[in-house]
Image (cartoon, helix red, strand yellow):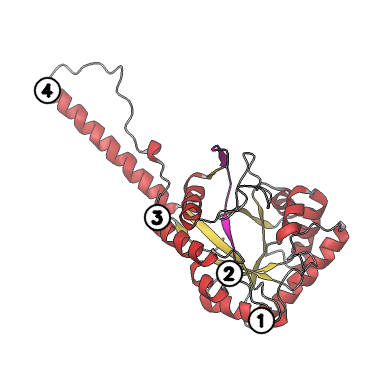
Amino acid sequence: MNRETRGSETQPHGRQGITPIPNESQAGASRHGDLVKLASELIEASREKRKASIDLNCDLGESFGAYTLGRDAEILPYVTSANIACGFHAGDPSVMQRTVKLAMEAGAAIGAHPGLPDLAGFGRRTIDVSASEVYAMTVYQIGALDAFVRAEGGTLKHVKPHGALYNMAAARANLAEAIAEAVYRVDPALTLFGLANSELTRAAERIGLRAAHEAFADRGYLADGSLVPRGLPGALIDDAETAAARVVRIALEGRVSTPDGEDAEVRADTVCLHGDNEHALAFARQIAEACQIAGVTVKPFE
């Protein structure tokens, strides 16, 4: 598996232009000094890696009635935050209850995953909704999931919009403000997850919410840091090793490769793995292993 490294931080400096040392003892002292300096740089780089951490979140509870989607019970041991569908784009009361229990047993932080009222389109179709409608549907869905969490003796930790609602709020300030206000009025202690440096995270910070800037393990990025639209080449990552290397690099460097071979800067407090992806379980395992090897701690956003 290819692992991303920051070799440039630990390489010795170039030696061109250094005045020759006139005697052997001085040369030995100089070499010793260079080795000590190099060792110090390697130790410091190692410390930086050990300090690196990331939250790995996954969209779960997206089955509905007789239809099963995803492998929630198998994925949960590898992730640290669970975004649970609230019945609009996916999920139903029984699925919500069951998924909350699974997440609590796994020790994952639980978040509401509100979406547009679009079961047939899995919440990924754009719908013409007003800011007031977005506010009401967000309050409604948070409240529904929060009731299940409280009934099981847990605490709701965050909110992450789903699909088209997420993308619309990332670009449209009025919808972002509606979601942020809904979250704040339900519980100002909740964290709002949103696309890194988007209208949604800015709205959260303006209103006084904690914002978790999010990146994606299984989605392609454009040079400006936005996601490649679904349906276009490079929109989806289907290789587990590629996804794992991407997460490690995001955690250590804040960068991600784009389809045209360039790098995009990505601020990330949390990285998303889509539970409906057929490769989600393999991705989760590979990401957890890669992070452990690279010294990146996977833990809930705090």
Q: Secondary structure at mark 4?
A: helix
> Which label's residue is closer to the chain start, 4 or 2?
4
* Residue 268 falls within the magenta-colored stretch: yes
Q: Residue 139: percent from the left, percent from the top?
A: 79, 68
Q: Amino acid at mark 2?
A: Ala
Note whether 122 is above or below 203 in the view shown.
below
Instruction: Specify whether 155 is left or right of 52.
Output: right
Residue located 82% across and 62% down the image: 135
The extreme left residue here reads 24
Element type at marker 1?
helix
Label 4 to label 1, Cα distance in Å?
A: 75 Å
Q: Position of residue 39 (x, y in %)?
A: 28, 40
Task: Judge the density around disc 1: few (<14), some (14-19), many (≥20) Cα neighbours within 10 Å.
Answer: some
Q: Nearer the viewer, mark 4 or mark 3?
A: 3
Q: Which mark is residue 24?
A: 4
Q: Residue at x 45, y 61 (%)?
A: 286
Which residue does the numbered mark 2 point to in the structure image?
Answer: 109
Q: Position of residue 282 (x, y in %)?
A: 48, 64
**Which quarter of the picture shows residue 91?**
bottom right
Which comes before the other along the chain, label 2 or label 3?
A: 2
Mark 3 and mark 1: span between their CA atoms? 35 Å
Circle 3 residue? 295
Q: Earlier in the sequence, mark 4 or mark 3?
A: 4
Quadrant of the image containing the C terminus: bottom right
Highlighted magenta segment, given as a residue range: 260-275
4 vs 1, front mark: 1
